Image (cartoon, grey):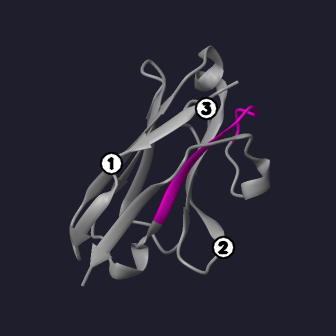
Amino acid sequence: QVQLVESGGGLVQTGGSLRLSCAASGRSFSTYGVGWFRQAPGKERVVVGALSWNGGHTYYADSVKGRFTISRDNTKNTMYLQMNGLKPEDTAVYYCAARRDPSMATVRGYYDYWGQGTQVTVSS
């Protein structure tokens, strides 16, 4: 069983930056594919970025390409989402996720473990 705990959300002005962290318990995290999702009020949870177990393959949603960077440090059992150039439309609850398969995935249902979510609010 893997538990994911997020941190780093908050309130930021347009154009600002935030870095989200997601700490994982469990020895197998380094072999898992991971992803970040977000859910805005009244909308579905959608993928923001995804990363394979060794970082060799990445995916970004078009809406965040060039602004967000997903990464991981398997020695620390932690994954990150660096968010730059934030916009009001980035406001959402952000979730980290992990899957027992080592490859990345963009579909919510392919993930086995989820964090509790952290709020990111971007003011205009």
**What kind of residue is marked 1?**
Gly
Instruction: Tell me where residue 85 appears, x and y as whole percent.
Output: 27, 70
The residue at 74%/40% (across/down) is: 112
Q: Which mark is residue 44?
A: 2
**Other-residue count near label 1 (Cα within 10 Å), few / some / many at <14 / 14–19 / ≥20:** some
Q: Residues within 10 Å of mark 3 (few under 14, many from 20)?
A: many
- Can you say whether 96 is above or below 120 in the image? above
- Dot 1 and dot 2 residues touching (CB under 8 Å): no
The crowd level at tag 2 (other Cα within 10 Å; few <14, some 14-19, many 20+) is few
Q: Nearer the viewer's eye, disc 2 or disc 3?
A: 2
Residue under label 3: 53
Secondary structure beneath dot 1 equals loop
How many numbered marks does the figure carry?
A: 3
Quadrant in the rendering for residue 15: bottom left
The quadrant in which residue 1 appears is top right
Residues at marks 2 and 3 touching, judged by CB atoms closer than 8 Å: no
Direction right: furthest residue: 109
Of label 1 and label 2, which has the lower sequence position?
Answer: 1
Q: From this viewpoint, is residue 97 visible?
A: yes
Report the quarter where the C terminus lies: bottom left
Q: Quadrant of residue 65?
A: bottom left
Q: What stretch of residues is rendered in magenta?
A: 93-103
Amino acid type at mark 2: Glu
Q: Is residue 59 visible?
A: no
Residue at 24% x, 61% y is 17
Q: Is residue 83 above or below residue 5?
A: below
